[in-house]
Image: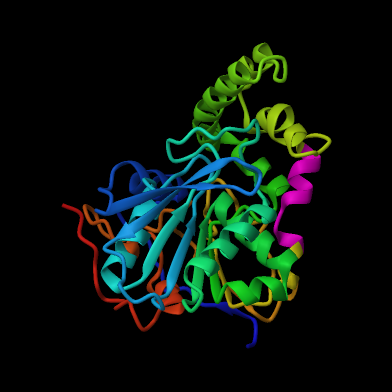
């Protein structure tokens, strides 16, 4: 399987120019795809809990392919990209499941820890549990934004072990170099995304401070304005990193792309206002199992196609879906949002 830099057919509509509009409009103004979930609460190996949402209708065949969605920072099964993917699974005979990070999906986890950008051990047991539940079903995974970095980091550091569990992965808009992308999100209008993330993260951190008195500094949490401050005060120390720079450096997936041993598509828009294009890897930096696709437009997890339609077309180019489960998904089928 030769590595490649794929030519992208994606073109943004003329009436939605620029990375910011292509990011914000699909997320905030386009209707979301309709999907009904069946929720489970999974116990973690360290006696914590996470929310797991299965798309319905679920396939009767236990050998039906499984599509695992790993959401982005402060995302959930209700995120526009998650609903689009899970609705397509429900229509296409694929068993779709959104595995939430700890503390996401409206479920408060029991421990002080939440999640980070490269929690490979978490993906280890989650994929292993899916394999136990469906021993003969092929497992695929799609990560978006932070979830994409997580997925690539896991695949790159686990190598052949990852390939034994998962048949293929897609990483959409991954911040592959967290340090490099931090320079993008801290400039100009992009700071609005930083502020948006922090608004919910601070609330969760303050709630944890009440549940674990004396562990977190409430006054310092209240003063947090930016992601780097949050990661420096909360994420880095809880997961054993020296500071935010140590955390960002060690949790970036880009240095590990050469270790990937399963079919992988990395999709990043060059005008992504959160990730940027300077961090995107070149073909010689990835393994032969990785295909790179860098459309000129699309924003961050946007890829709009048409107004007032909720479909995977304005989230992801069609080849992305046919790559994962070509037998079950008809590329021309649209998912209408009513």
Quadrant for residue 214, please give it: top right
**Residue at position x 57%, y 32% from top?**
110
Whether residue 157 sits left or right of residue 334 in the image: it is right
Residue situated in front as seen by the camera: 336 or 89: 89
Whether residue 136 sits left or right of residue 174 in the image: it is left
Whether residue 160 sits left or right of residue 167 in the image: it is right
The magenta segment? 245-255
Residue 337 point in image, percent of width and height: 20, 54
Was residue 55 drawn as part of the magenta stretch in this picture?
A: no
**Residue at position x 72%, y 53% from top?**
252
Residue 146 point in image, percent of width and height: 58, 50
Quadrant for residue 85, please give it: bottom left
**Residue at position x 31%, y 71% from top?**
59
Residue 289 point in image, percent of width and height: 64, 79
Outermost residue toward the bottom in this view: 1
Outermost residue toward the right in this view: 242
Can residue 260 be seen here?
Answer: yes
Was residue 249 drawn as part of the magenta stretch in this picture?
A: yes
Residue situated in front as seen by the camera: 77 or 311: 77
Whether residue 290 sits left or right of residue 98 in the image: it is right
Residue 74 point in image, percent of width and height: 50, 39
Residue situated in front as seen by the camera: 217 or 72: 217
């Amino acid at each position: 399987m030769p590595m490649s830099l794929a030519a992208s057919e994606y073109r943004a509509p003329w009436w939605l120019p620029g990375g910011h509009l292509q990011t914000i409009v699909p997320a905030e103004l386009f209707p979301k795809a309709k999907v009904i979930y069946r929720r489970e609460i999974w116990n973690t190996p360290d006696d914590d809990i996470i929310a797991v949402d299965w798309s319905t209708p679920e396939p009767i065949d236990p050998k039906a392919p499984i599509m695992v969605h790993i959401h982005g920072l402060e995302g959930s099964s209700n995120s526009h990209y998650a609903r689009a993917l899970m609705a397509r699974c429900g229509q296409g005979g694929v068993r779709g499941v959104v595995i939430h990070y700890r503390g996401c999906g409206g479920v408060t986890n029991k421990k002080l820890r939440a999640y980070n950008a490269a929690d490979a051990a978490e993906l280890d047991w989650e994929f292993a549990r899916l394999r136990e539940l469906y021993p003969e079903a092929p497992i695929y995974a799609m990560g978006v934004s932070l979830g994409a970095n997580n997925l690539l980091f896991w695949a790159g550091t686990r190598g052949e072990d990852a390939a034994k569990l998962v048949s293929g992965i897609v990483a959409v808009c991954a911040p592959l170099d967290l340090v490099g992308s931090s320079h993008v999100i801290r400039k100009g209008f992009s700071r609005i995304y930083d502020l948006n993330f922090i608004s919910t993260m601070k609330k969760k951190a303050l709630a944890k401070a009440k549940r674990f008195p004396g562990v977190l500094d409430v006054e310092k949490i209240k003063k947090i304005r930016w992601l780097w401050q949050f990661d420096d005060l909360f994420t880095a120390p809880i997961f054993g990193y020296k500071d935010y720079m140590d955390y960002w450096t060690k949790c970036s997936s880009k240095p590990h792309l050469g270790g990937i041993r399963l079919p992988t598509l990395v999709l990043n828009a060059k005008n992504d206002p959160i990730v940027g294009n300077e961090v995107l890897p070149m073909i010689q930096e990835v393994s032969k199992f990785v295909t790179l696709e860098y459309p000129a437009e699309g924003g961050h997890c946007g890829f709009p196609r048409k107004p007032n339609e909720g479909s995977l077309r304005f989230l992801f180019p069609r080849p992305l879906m046919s790559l994962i489960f070509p037998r079950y998904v008809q590329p021309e089928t649209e998912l209408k949002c009513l």
